[in-house]
Image (cartoon, helix red, strand yellow):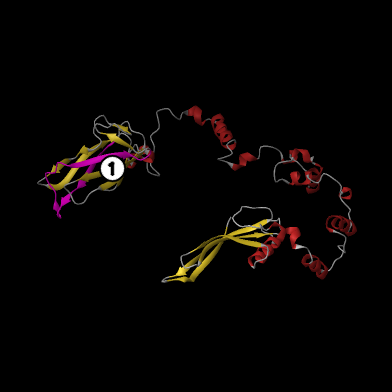
Amino acid sequence: METVRIQNGQSEPIQTYLEADGSPATGLTDAYVTVRRLSDDYFLDWDDGTFKASGWTERQHLMSEVNATNAPGWYEATFNSTGYADDTYVVEVTCASADNVPQSGEIKVGDYVDNIDASIASRAAPGDAMDLVTDAVDAAAVAASGANEIRDSILSDGTAFPGARIDAAISTRSSHSAADAADAVWDEALAGHAAAGSAGEAQAHLDADVSTRSSHSAADVDTVLSAAHGSGSWAGASAAAVADAVWGELVADHYGTAGSAAEALAVIRGLVQQNFILDETTYNSSGLLTACRIRIYDSAANVPSTGGGSETTGLLATYNVTAVAESGNAERVDYYRAVKVP
């Protein structure tokens, strides 16, 4: 099946060829056609000719055989577009007794084809004489006054005659120079040009003299840093001096910053068994340690004296450790893993 376009109000025959086992299928009584309106997916109820979302009496319409003798395998139904909106209507044919199904096509109703309301042959060709209504052009119409009116009409139509644009003396137009335009721009009040992203908005933010802004010197900055971090040669310090200050900083002063280098160093130190406790141990029948918990603290004073607790003061990290014995040898470790508890 194919796509066809018809004018609104026209009828269109829906014809399809059905075959079974490679031969035309004749005498079928189960060849059905459905029509779906594409804009809302409503189906045609062939019983009352309306499109519905549900509740059809006859959604599948039985197709008629064209002629079993002279046109074997051909079946048809008629789609009448009268009263329907301009739209695309999807046609689908199904048949349980045929092999070449389902088949589908489209009927496009209306749109530009509705404007084709006369044959091309009925229109005048270029150069043909045209019959005018009797007395359409009389003596008065071609008199001098009539000719003047035609001229004036043409000259006042700017779309038909560009010359009509010359509708005032050039001497009456503005004689301002480029300098005059520049003066007008720079003298314009910013308050009237505060649209987002405009030059006026940007300049409006320059709301103070530069001389009123901070004039702090390097020495002033040095004073502030020394007050916050201790005295030192902050002003003009060399890269080496800054490096010495960084590496000389106490790691313990920066444990509390999650994700910091100080925290990472403290955890690494704990994993080499400084300020840590291993508890909640589990052993297999051969005495192999198969599970435990490791907790790392920021100082020896905060490490619990006994295991099995939930102390959090100074706690930096907790790891769950598991070990798996070798297959066939419960006394040897095959692998173990340590996972940090979130």
Q: Does the magenta stretch include residue 14?
A: yes
x then y, percent, for residue 166: 65, 40
Q: Mark 1 points at which residue?
A: 91
Q: Is residue 237 magenta?
A: no
Residue located at (17% from left, 46% from top):
74
Residue type (three-letter) at the residue carrying disc 1: Val
x then y, percent, for residue 192: 75, 38
263, above or below 129, in the image: below
217, above or below 289, in the image: above
Q: Please tell me which residue lies in front, 116 or 289.
A: 289
* Quadrant the C terminus occupies: bottom right
Could you tell me if residue 158 is visible in this image? Answer: yes
x then y, percent, for residue 183: 81, 45
Classify mark 1: helix, strand or loop: strand
Q: Please tell me which residue lies in front, 258 or 53.
A: 258
Could you tell me if residue 299 is visible in this image? Answer: no
Residue located at (84% from left, 57% from top):
225
Q: Please tell me which residue lies in front, 217 or 1.
A: 217
Q: Please tell me which residue lies in front, 279 or 110.
A: 279
The residue stretch that appears in magenta: 10-39
Left or right relative to 274: residue 247: right
Crowding at dot 1, Cα within 10 Å, few <14 / some 14-19 / many 20+, comes out as many
160, above or below 137, in the image: below
x then y, percent, for residue 240: 81, 70
Left or right relative to 308: residue 24: left
